[in-house]
Image (spheres, rainbow, N blue to C red):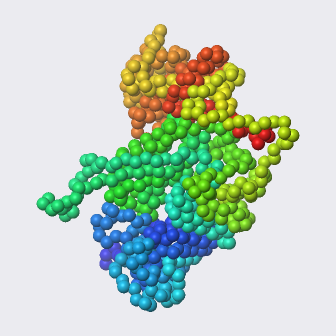
Amino acid sequence: MGRIHVLPEHVANKIAAGEVVERPASVVKELLENALDAGARRIRVQVEGGGKKLIQITDDGCGMVRDDALLAFERHATSKIRTADDLLTVATLGFRGEALPSIASVSRLRLETCAAESRTDPHLPKPGRYSAPTAPTAPTALSAATGTVIEIAGGTILKVEEAGLPTGTSIAVRDLFFNVPARRKFLRSESTELAQIASLVTHYALAHPDKHFELHSSVNAMLIAAPVASHQERIYQVFGRETLDQLLPLAAMLPLARVGLPQPPPWARRDENEDQEKFVPGELRLHGFASKPEIQKLNRNSMFVFVNGRLIRDKVVQHALTESYRNILPPTVYPVVLLFLEMPSTELDVNVHPSKVEVRFRQQSVVHDFVRDAVRAALMKARPVPQFTREITAQPTASPGLTPGAAAGARAHPVAPPRFASGQAPPGATRMGQPGELGITQADADFALSAPALLPVSQRLEFQGSIDVEGNAAVPVARLGSQAVVPDGGCTREIPEPPPSDAPPFESLKPLGQVRESFILAVNEEGLWIVDQHVAHERVLFEKVLRQRAAERVESQRLLMPLIIELTPQQQAIFAEICDELRRNGFDAEPFGSRTIAVKTAPAGVDASDVEHMLHELLTQFEREEQALNLEIARTRIAASIACHAAIKINTPLTPDKMEWLLRELAKTECPMSCPHGRPVVLRYSVKDIQKAFKRI
């Protein structure tokens, strides 16, 4: 007898569930995507026990008829595709037909669904529902008036009956992994699983601002987001004005040109004599928000990327985002990004991962460079300057979110809500503002942060794997406790606002002096500025070296005596790779013996005593690289190292003319707010902050 046999269906379903259903958040993701594909305008998520006891998702989508509801629990039964060619043009979030049978095989599931009375309603999507086939069905009077209830436990259908239900679908998943105890014991704590679910629902609410989302845990309303007109209004609605002010808007478009792509297979080619319409590749569009350099995270968990409405984790896009912040952020920290990419479905392959969290782009290099350049251009245009009161306590954090380390203190100052096109706050904003509606209890204390004493109504919910959700950020200012202002008896006058100016703020700076011969104090109409003279000169020299390198005109100096440097075997291999780039940056070094090199010339401005240290520093940095050496990265690192060693040092007295020259040169740079290593160059103490410190406002 042979040793190979076909697995029973229930075993195959449990194996498939291991790929699709990793944790309760995976169930929420699949059901949320099904609801969105069904055209739902209102989605409600109910969770108990972190999703282990209950996950219930109710929507007002198109619903299903009885036959479709039964077929939806068959393996690979779907309404989204019919042929293999459809995989190349998938426009829906779901298409594999594995989610419902996989979930039903490891839980106790109850489905309640009712199809719309008329399939001709223009507002209803034409495809079927919840992985159901799209076979044309003429609804009878019975199917249009009644719904279907199906109960399944461990993949076995227990009950199928008719019931009077509203249009839409409700799926309740209870006792997840009740029949797979080995999987259940690997789940995290209830608060951790709930945080994952909250992260997922929050970010799908951000991606679909035109829909109503609710998330309830037991009896607590964790998120209630009514439909709004734009993503900007949704961010304000969910996170508040302070978070919105920390983000820079992104928008870019690129016409796609498909160059060098393979021809379709012979069976998919059309007859040459057949009239064909001219193919238009379409456009690649980008919009979203990126954080200012002052917000720093210790991992990439705060980069959220949506492609055609699908939340993904893609290394190509993440690398592009990291590259866009190169020489603006330190190399070991990452920004917060909420990015939406839109492209023709033919340019994207979503059938590369069981849970559809990874995709493959047809033109990866085009997408990578487009994202990198678009985000970089927005940063260069905005030139965000760190605030002194925020930067003084801000530290890189591992917890995903938008709020820097100083945000807790900054919340003590109420801010006015932004005005949008209608002149009012976005609809539904006040619905999230009442602490009573949020119902924060001790059970949620594992991931809830207490509010500052001055604002007892402000409370922040921090979710693992997501942005910090400001539970009542949309509360009008009138409802917030105001900060005390010392009475002045009418003796003081209000400081007038300066007239608007088109000149960049750096060009109007006037130096006052130095603090310990290391920091330049300067002023303009915006307030008091503190400039780190070393990193300011470092930024000026860094961009100068890059310009000279591009023009092949790098200034160098010949050493009085050749400098002999001993290298390790690994450093020798790295030196062989970057020696040409070193030569183009002003170094003249050649092998001198088996494990030594002789340096004859060095870049101008670098002391001879620093040359050996600088070369060892560069080689050590490249030794730590886990990926293949990138010449563009090598070029910028060499330029940054030259600038660092040639720049003005701290504890160096400067004349007023020298300080004015340095500020003028800094204003001419592309990125005056941070040095090549990511440290801030300037800090601003705004007039408003000064007035607050003196209790004038």
Q: Is residue 513 left or right of residue 304?
A: right
Pick out the residue farthest to the top: 560
Q: Is residue 597 left or right of residue 135?
A: right
**Can residue 299 be seen in this snapshot?**
no
The relative height of residue 522 versus residue 70 in the rendered view (above or below) is above
- Quadrant housing residue 500: top right
In the image, what residue occupies the spot 57% across and 71% down? Answer: 44
In the image, what residue occupies the spot 36% across and 83% down? Answer: 137
The relative height of residue 37 versus residue 686 in the rendered view (above or below) is below
In the image, what residue occupies the spot 33% across and 62% down? Answer: 89
The relative height of residue 346 versus residue 101 in the rendered view (above or below) is above
The relative height of residue 106 versus residue 594 in the rendered view (above or below) is below
In the image, what residue occupies the spot 46% across and 70% down? Answer: 39
- Quadrant housing residue 184: bottom right
The quadrant in which the N terminus is found is bottom left
Q: Position of residue 315 (x, y in %)?
A: 44, 50
Looking at the picture, tell me which residue is in the foreground, 275 or 459. 275
Q: Position of residue 168 (x, y in %)?
A: 50, 78
Pick out the residue farthest to the right: 489
